[in-house]
Image (spheres, rainbow, N blue to C red):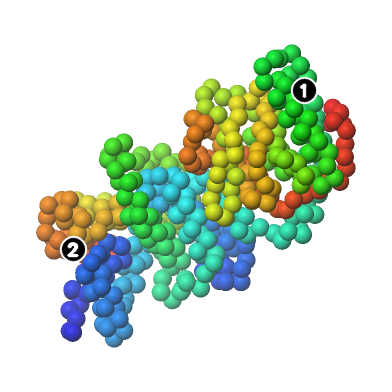
Amino acid sequence: MAEADDELARRLADRDPEAFEQLYRRYAPAAYGVALRVLRDPTIAQEVAAESFLALWSAPEAYDASRGRFRSFFLSLVHHRAVDAVRREERLRERERRVNRAPLPDEDWSEAVVEEADLADRRREVREALAELPPDQREALELMYFKGYTQSRIAEERGIPLGTVKTRVHAAMRKLRERLA
Amino acid sequence: MSWDHERVEELLAGLALGGLDGDDRGLAERAIAEHLSECRRCRQTLDDYRAIAGDLALAAPPAVPPDLLGVRLSRTLAPSPSLGARRASWAMVGAAVVALGLLSGWNVMLTDRLGDAEVQQRWMAEAVATLGSPEAGVLSLEGEGQIHLLWAPEAERMYLVASGMSPLERGVYHVWLVNEEGWRSAGTFVPDEGVAMVPMDEEPGSFQEVVITHEETEDAPTPNPSPLAHGTVVQPTVAPATPSPTAGG
């Protein structure tokens, strides 16, 4: 049976490479996947994923089990680093605009990855919860999360008041909280 | 300042998603410092929103990470040099013999050719001399074909020797050297009947990884994220014997 995240995280604090390897195998596809989705550049996505795992190895004490699940903590770490990177690399936006505005094909990557059952179940729940959001709320949330847009930028690019963006994002998070928390 | 729960939660939603800028970010940080320390409801909201923000990553399709990622991370957690050296010493004997045999075969192939044959034979002679050094090092890469990196402290160059490589319809095989600062190109090659040799003006201690990729062009700025072969330098290893050039057959 797969070892629980919290036990592996505890072993990380003892500098246990085997625990690190298990966490890597468990979360590398999700970490690389979200970095790739945000950055749309395999090389930079790989850098972000590597930095995130190395940060975990260097400072495992950053995870506080009393504040939430390891999965959320680590994927949030990866996401924040990806957003920081995409904002630094503004030229990526230009490349994306020139080369490909269409969403990346989700199913092509998903089929190649075999995940543990609970992670796959949670992935399905998250996707279903997102799909149930009203389109304007979902768009605002996805622009912020997967494109690295700030609320101000969404307001500017969509031509809507900043307050409207804030309201939509908050409403979306409330619905997700009811559904997922 | 009095804080309204609704307003604070709105800020926390944007903060958890990483979407605040300017004044709102400062306001959110202030709310955390001034209000959340005393408001259990908003503390719970922040924890929940952060958990959701983490799990939203799962809405992105999972992707098989490049092998290079695992290689780089495993290097960080590499076993101690003494353990690595003990393991490598036996493996290097076989690798040295195989590499010499390879070079001999290549030599035969080149006898029927003109053009670059003279240059390549000189490389081969240097590589044989390199491997003949009592302090020669050999790194055998894992993955595509049989690829060995040869070096010796007194030699001017390192040599990469490859055999059993798949023919390429287009593009080149690219040799990358990786260290803590990133990667750099060390040359490209197109195998001749599966065999190739690449002389490299590099210092053995200046990198920890050798990675072979397939690239569309010779001037690829960054490695293809899916390497075809790779090897990790544990430490310079010593070939214990000095076999003759015909020892590998």
Q: Residue at x 37, y 49 (%)?
A: A39
Q: Is residue A51 visible?
A: yes
Residue A53 badge: none
Q: Nearer the viewer, residue A159 or B198?
A: B198
Q: Position of residue A102 (x, y in %)?
A: 28, 39
Q: Residue at x 26, y 55 (%)?
A: A149
Q: Is residue B164 visible?
A: no
- Specify the quadrant that holds the N terminus of chain B: bottom left
User: SS at mark 1?
Assistant: helix
Q: Above or below — where is B57 with respect to B116?
A: below
Residue B107 badge: 1
> Residue at label 2?
A166
Q: In the figure, residue B50 lies in which quadrant?
A: bottom left
Give the alpha-carbon distance from disc 1 to disc 2, as whole Å. Answer: 71 Å
Q: Above or below — where is A49 with respect to B244?
A: below
Q: Residue at x 27, y 61 (%)?
A: B19
- Specify the quadrant that holds the C terminus of chain B: top right
| Residue A69 located left or right of residue B153 | left
Q: Residue at x 71, y 14 (%)?
A: B113
* Amino acid type of the residue that numbered disc 2 sits on in the rendered structure: Lys
| Residue B23 located left or right of residue B116 | left
Q: In the figure, residue B77 lies in which quadrant?
A: bottom right
Which chain letter goes with mark 1? B
| Residue B107 located left or right of residue A110 | right
Q: Position of residue B181 (x, y in %)?
A: 54, 54
Q: Above or below — where is A176 with respect to B96?
A: below
Looking at the picture, do discs 1 and 2 lie on one chain? no
* Crowding at mark 2 (Cα within 10 Å: few <14, some 14-19, many 20+): many
Q: Nearer the viewer, residue A62 or A128?
A: A62
* Amino acid type of the residue that numbered disc 1 sits on in the rendered structure: Asn
Q: How many marks?
A: 2
| Residue B65 located left or right of residue B9 | right
